[in-house]
Every structure is written in C-alpha cells, then in structure tokens.
Amino acid sequence: MKYMLLICGDETSAEHAQDGCGGWSAEMIERGVIVGGGGLHPPTDATTVRVRDDAVLLTDGPFAETKEQMGGFCLIDCADLDEAIEIAAKHPAATYGTIEIRPML
C-alpha cells in the first residue's frame, strides 16, 4: 500500500531545514519502501493558485496563515498502516515536528 508522509513543523522547524534525514533515508532505500519525496522551500516561496468564476487568482506564499507548515514529503510503499507508522516514527522530523500519514487513492 502506498502512503504519503507529510512532514510538517512550525516556524522553529526552519532551523532543521538543512539537517537532512541522517541514516533514515539510507535505511528506507535499503528496505525498498521509498518511492519518492523531497524537501520544500519555505512557504514564503510558494505561489497559491485558485480559480473563481473562471478567473485565476494567485497569492504569493500560502493561502492560509497557519502555525504549522509542510517542509517536505515522502511517498512510501509498505505492507500496511502499522509499517507506515513505524517508518514515520523513525524519521528525524518526528522529534521536532509532525508527520501526517495519508493513504494514497
């Protein structure tokens, strides 16, 4: 089953932006569960697109002001939710932020 790990944190997580994932990535590649993923630039670099009444509306940065922001994502392919939880719990970002696990459609 494929799952998306959404790696999130508040503004203080920015200090970890260049930390990398330590041995987590290497272990997950060796296990064969990583399908894809990557880190993201900060929300200030985002462009948000909405279409209303056939008009394209652009917003610099995130549309909603939130305390938590997505810093990256991983797409994993594993046996079940229990394995996805085990994988997410090993990610270094779980110690200072949150990792949301979403099953893929």
Image (cartoon, rainbow, N blue to C red):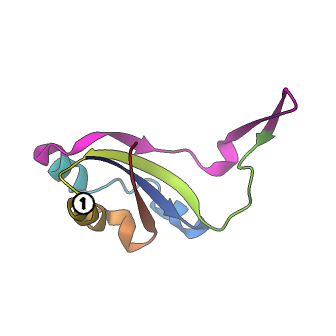
In this view, the residue farthest toward the front is 105
Provide residue 24's location: percent of width, then percent of height. Answer: 23, 56
Residue 54 colored magenta?
Answer: yes
The residue that label 1 is drawn on is 87
Q: Nearer the viewer, residue 18 or 7?
A: 7
Identify which residue is drawn at 66% across, 42% down.
Answer: 45
Which portion, as a residue range, is magenta? 29-58
Say few, some or many: other residues with alpha carbon within 10 Å of mark 1 (under 14 / 14 to 19 / 20 or more).
some
Q: Position of residue 85 (x, y in %)?
A: 28, 65
Residue 43 on the magenta span: yes
- Write down the quadrant of residue 29 in the picture: top left
Instruction: Kindly give the residue lying farthest to the left in the view shown.
Output: 30
Residue at 26% across, 57% down = 22
Amino acid at circle 1? Ile
Seen at 20% across and 50% down, the residue is 78
Position of residue 89 in the picture relative to residue 32 (left or right) = right
**Which residue is farthest top?**
54
Q: Secondary structure at mark 1?
A: helix
Q: From the top left corner, tell me how far across and down residue 104 is, in percent.
A: 38, 45
- Residue 95 in the image: state x and y as whole percent: 37, 73
